[in-house]
Amino acid sequence: MRARRLHLSFLSTTTTISLTLTPHSLTQRRVHFRNFSSSQIMRTLCVDSLNPAILNVEYAVRGELAIRAEHYRHLLQRPNHGLPFDRVINSNIGNPQQKGLDQPPITWNRQIAALTEYPELIEKAKDLFPEDAVERAKELLEEVGSIGAYSHSQGVPLIRKSVADFIAERDGHPADPGHIFLTAGASAGVALLLSMLIAKPGKSGVLIPIPQYPLYTATLAQYNGVPVPYHLDEKSGWSTSPEHILEALEKAKSEGIDVRAVVVINPGNPTGSLLTPAIQKHIVQICNDHGLMLLADEVYQENLHYRDEYPFTSFKKILCEMGNQADVALASFHSTSKGVTGECGRRGGYFELVKVDDEVLAQIYKMASVGLCPPVPGQVAVDCMVRPPKRGSPSYLRWKAETDAIHTALATRTKTMVARLNSLPGMSCQSANGALYLYPRIELPPRVIEAAHKAGKKADTFYALALLDATGICAVSGSGFGQRGDEGNFRLTCLCSGVEEYVGKLEKFHREFMEKYS
Amino acid sequence: MRARRLHLSFLSTTTTISLTLTPHSLTQRRVHFRNFSSSQIMRTLCVDSLNPAILNVEYAVRGELAIRAEHYRHLLQRPNHGLPFDRVINSNIGNPQQKGLDQPPITWNRQIAALTEYPELIEKAKDLFPEDAVERAKELLEEVGSIGAYSHSQGVPLIRKSVADFIAERDGHPADPGHIFLTAGASAGVALLLSMLIAKPGKSGVLIPIPQYPLYTATLAQYNGVPVPYHLDEKSGWSTSPEHILEALEKAKSEGIDVRAVVVINPGNPTGSLLTPAIQKHIVQICNDHGLMLLADEVYQENLHYRDEYPFTSFKKILCEMGNQADVALASFHSTSKGVTGECGRRGGYFELVKVDDEVLAQIYKMASVGLCPPVPGQVAVDCMVRPPKRGSPSYLRWKAETDAIHTALATRTKTMVARLNSLPGMSCQSANGALYLYPRIELPPRVIEAAHKAGKKADTFYALALLDATGICAVSGSGFGQRGDEGNFRLTCLCSGVEEYVGKLEKFHREFMEKYS
């Protein structure tokens, strides 16, 4: 209850400051709404009358730490803010194009967006756009008519065809546009499929990695599904152990849980770990042997820091190559929010279903149609991502230079950060092969655990809040990813420009913090 | 089961034809996927293993009729299609910018979209954009940084402020940006709030109008909520009777249903009816007396055919003017998909909460944050809708001419259609004050009911399928909106250009149909 109230107080502060009300009028507003809260309303719509599954949802990436960071950002606009830093560094969320971060949009994507939004430009501003971008925009407009119309609920057929071609080219195995669903980011697809798999509230389970991206536990909580955690192995670079999956599965079964599916995030979030094909094959085999659906979160497939040595292998490819050995239903999720595209705000993504029968497809299509259609600008972003300019075409060189620069910056920053974090006392950080994050670990001195306990916080959150208060760096603590909290992990994104300033601040804070508590 | 299979077979046809496979290869593909469906997969992911609540969802607007229409659209691409029409007329969905329909996008909206998507245009194509559009784009970019970044989960603060100003101006009562949530169309907001109100699966109920927009029953089915139907009164122009609401409420209570809220659609969908302020006040009073939340679907507030005589009054205004008389929690939904904006594909919308306490707001914020953020291009569309060009500004005259033309075309078309439908034998049609639809009624001869029964269809769907087969006109039958089916209603949109051809075809079909069956 205490945590909820804290959450709340920050929300109010935020929304109030965005209204530029003073603390005085904030108090007034509260009093005002308190007056509304008669027993009548309380009965209808007090928090305790809400769906209890909703109350159980936790979502740390935008939780307490993020809300406090937002609060500081507003305070910083005042001349005498009294904070010991002059900007908030958002290291909490994989939001590449966020203000103050380092990843610009790809020109190709934005040119096609502008042309499809405002087709008059095709005639009137010919010299501002390369020929291939104009051709692509015309092709998309010919298909959709207007970007402002609802599309097919499953996504624009032409764009689903582009996705299928991209998958076929990537894997060397064909893909069927009829089995591809465009979505509002990968999250929407994950939520839809999880909601369908939870057949028995409180009984149907889904295996999820710990640490995990909290979308999974949040969505399972919302639909009364049971999260069945399997632990990743930090000491082996956060690798996935098929044995851990099997143990977790057997334990859940023995508790009467009907385990329906396994979630694998590859490359990993928050860990940045990349699975080997041998382990992927092992996981598919487990799914086959135990009748599990495989939910493969592959949204970071493009973010690879050592792509020549360690390329991405999709679960679709593994499954196809196992042939009749594996009869496993697979959903593979991809997104325009990550990779070099980084268009989070557009809400684009897709999932491909493999070995899923037509009756189930019809049910998924029906549910997609209740939501009418995924955002069309997001669908256009998907097309741009899976059909970049061809080598030799007018847009190719610019596109190549821009995407190379993003890959290089991310890889360089990641490597620098790993080295510097590992040189800090009491801190260790596994290197990451992919994704946008690092997930270092602090050996928390007993006095920190004690102080955190007194403050009513998990130890890792206690550390992350102290980091935020001292430096303005907003990270997410490991307990937000499903860890206990005393392991002392936290997630940093590798998207922030100015590594020198950023890591420098973190180093200074960390040394002082460890000194204080040891 | 039969209906589900039919659904399915159309889905397969559609997706296959979009692949331009021949019927032969379609068969092959099916055989191929049948091979995958071993007992192993069937156990994990056969339709009967899915969440039963999902199987119960029905969604007619994009159901059997729409799927058959899509099938015909593909057939028409063949030279010898053998169909008795040469185009499909989509009268089934309020999708103003759909191909072949009549509502162009507003230039103001698209210019700002293009400028925010591709800010290079601000410098490079100055002469193509009016100054006020450039200023607006700069203001939005200053706020969001990049349109490709996740925004605040509740929506961009500046845009929520624009919405609050719009509401205050509309109603003459202040609005709080902290109580406004931007959404991916109104549907996403409706689904979120309904999911929160269903505290007890199978027991928590929500009053919904019949006929209703099927989003409500679909979403209630998905979350195991109980739809509590109250019937609208066709003979009085589809007015809402507070007595019917009370009767339905009392009946549900007597059956042990915990009724949480009432949904009111104003102007009505599918009816086009506009509530009088007196009836609105009466409804608010019922909510007050019975502790119900009021969910006001006001997405058609801009679509009014007699705006001087019958203006729109929001429930927010009614509630404010009732003062202490009514302690009712209200959610009012609005959308960029309807009105003169018509940007369905962008997925923009918002809801405003009134008299909802801060703890509940915090829960809603948390759930919004699990979905990360509403699509930013949709949010920009909301800003354009609620902050159109000011009188005297460079964009004003074009904006005024474009929006006037849309209002006039829709009103004229609606009136023409009402008159012509009412002149048909056995057909009556209430006139509509607003929205995008007409909901005529056919006195179905007993022989139609009999023939429908034999065909395993509801009578109204039997009629609508015959209409589609004969003319290519795709409408939605009344049973799709929650009616029994033998009342003989169906919904037509008033968005199709070429009323002469369209209504002409309908008239010819109707006379022949009635002759055949009487």
Image (cartoon, coloured by chain):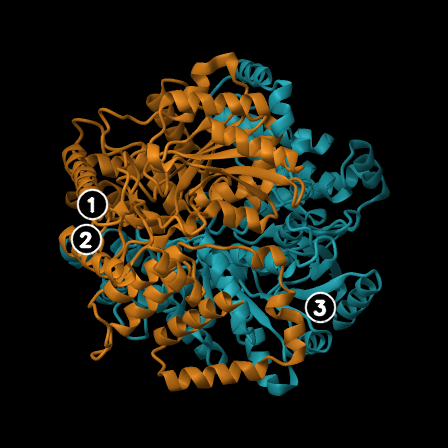
Chain colours: A orange, B cyan
Label 3 sits on a secondary structure element that is loop
Cα distance, mark 2 to mark 3? 63 Å
Whether labels 3 and 1 belong to a single chain: the reply is no
Gap in Å between the C-alphas at discs 2 and 1?
A: 7 Å
Residue placed under numbered mark 2 in the picture: A503
**Residue corresponding to mark 1:** A417
Task: Give the image location of residue B315, x and y in percent.
Answer: 58, 74
Residue type, mark 1 in image: Met
Q: Are marks 2 and 1 in contact (CB under 8 Å)?
A: yes
Q: Secondary structure at mark 2?
A: helix
Decide if residue B344 is on the left or right side of residue B144. Answer: right
Tell me the amino acid under the disc marked 2: Val
Residue pictured at 23% horizontal, 45% vertical: A123
Residue at screen point 39% across, 76% down: A16
What residue appears at the point 34 percent right and 35 percent down from the top-left corner?
A235
Residue B105 visible in rendering: no
* Residue drawn 67% across the image and 55% down it: B439
On screen, residue B392 versus residue B208, left or right, reads left
Q: Earlier in the sequence, mark 2 or mark 1?
A: 1
B389 horizontally vs B293: left or right: left
Chain of the residue where label 2 is placed in the rendered structure: A
Chain letter of disc 1 in the image? A
Q: Which residue is mark 3?
A: B240
- The 10 Å Cα crowd at callout 1, few under 14, some 14 to 19, many 20 or more, is many
Q: Nearer the viewer, mark 2 or mark 3?
A: 2
Kindly identify the amino acid type of the residue bearing the numbered disc 3: Thr
* For residue A271, above or below residue B260: above
Say whether residue A358 is left or right of residue A321: right
Q: Position of residue A339 (x, y in %)?
A: 29, 39
Give the letter of the chain under mark 3.
Answer: B
